Image (cartoon, rainbow, N blue to C red):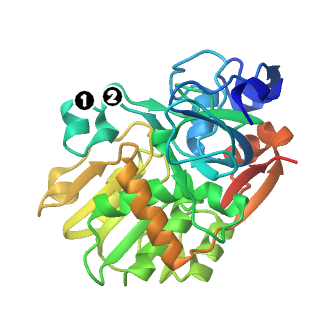
Amino acid sequence: MTASEVPVPTSAWVVERPGPIASTPLRLVERETPGPGPGELLVRVRACGVCRTDLHLAEGDLAPHRTRCTPGHEAVGEVIAAGPGVLDLRVGDRVGAAWLAGTCGECRYCRTGRENLCPASRYTGWDIHGGYADHLLVDARYAYRLPEGWSDEDAAPLLCAGIIGHRALERAELPPGGRLGIYGFGASAHLTVQLALARGAEVHVVTRSPHAQRLALELGAASAGADAPPQPLDCAILFAPVGNLVPVALAALDRGGTLAIAGIHLSEIPPLDYDRHLFQERTVRSVTANTRADGRAFLAEAARLRPSVRVTRYPMRRADQALKDLAAGRITGVAVLVTP
């Protein structure tokens, strides 16, 4: 299909007015489908994962970067048109669009392999329209080829839940055979625990949800409950956006342990006690987006390990309900929007 044959219109969800999810901040609209510009792909969306970041954007925890933006940054689809200058992807290819949508390529962070820290970075579903839509535009340099043998629904969560979990695991510096604590057990955590187990870790999950506890144990966690892990941890990852858990997770670390905070948004952190939480070389780190190298490394690892993806499917027309269910804790694993 050429750019002149692009179908119109596109159905898309937009954040009409950020606010509590019960106030229905999302609205389904129709708009003209844009043709791809230089270096761009037009992708027909077949599946899009539902991420907690989408909820933060809809509710206003993250300030909007553009008005009436379409959320969604775990989009899987088919290339239906390519703009001038696209060399390695073509019409008919299956691609994934992830959170990182663009960087300047010239700043000191980009030049030193830290493009996730680029001050000019742009993000799918925040700076540009995302995958809660029939179609989206993707910079071909930031599109991913996806592992063969994965359905669209199973591949979609790999693009954020998987990639961010992989980066968080790297930031936590899991030692060989070490004990890893995971706080909160949603989309990213249920993939990360499988990566950690494949690397020989002993994993302890802290979550209040009985359904999540059962899933964690099914996937191989050594323990899963609402209380502190039964043994000191070598490292931990905080997935829940709850600042009160930072001192709790730090207190559970053994000497020299590292806590990686994986979320883009976190509620206020209470005061830390130096002797209890940080002394003996305990470390706390944030995780900021990802690089394309992270994405490629994770997708290669996922292709080898074939982690189980626990998907709850929603029709694209029920994206607002999927976010309501996510906010209410009614989703175990990951929600994925699918198109007809």
Q: Residue at image x 45%, y 46%?
A: 263
Q: Which of 187 and 151 lies nearest the eye of the viewer?
A: 151
Residue at far left of view = 280
Spot occupied by residue 82 in the image (x, y as percentages of width and height): 62, 35
Q: Which of 70 and 318 lies nearest the eye of the viewer?
A: 70
Q: Is residue 197 left or right of residue 249?
A: right
Instruction: Please indicate, yes or no, whether residue 19 appears anywhere in the rendered image.
Output: yes
Instruction: Please indicate, yes or no, whether residue 261 appears anywhere in the rendered image.
Output: no
Q: Which residue is mark 2?
A: 104
The answer to whether the residues at label 1 and label 2 have Cβ atoms under 8 Å apart is yes
Spot occupied by residue 230 in the image (x, y as percentages of width and height): 39, 79
Q: Is residue 177 above or below residue 187?
A: below
Within-10-Å neighbours for mark 1: few <14, some 14–19, many 20+: few
Q: CA distance from mark 1 to mark 2?
A: 5 Å
Q: Which residue is mark 1?
A: 106
Q: Residue at image x 35%, y 48%?
A: 287
Count how many numbered circles sit on residues in the image.
Answer: 2
SS label for mark 1:
loop
Q: Is residue 23 above or below residue 260?
A: above
> Given the image, on which type of amino acid does mark 2 rest?
Cys
Q: Which of 287 and 212 lies nearest the eye of the viewer?
A: 287
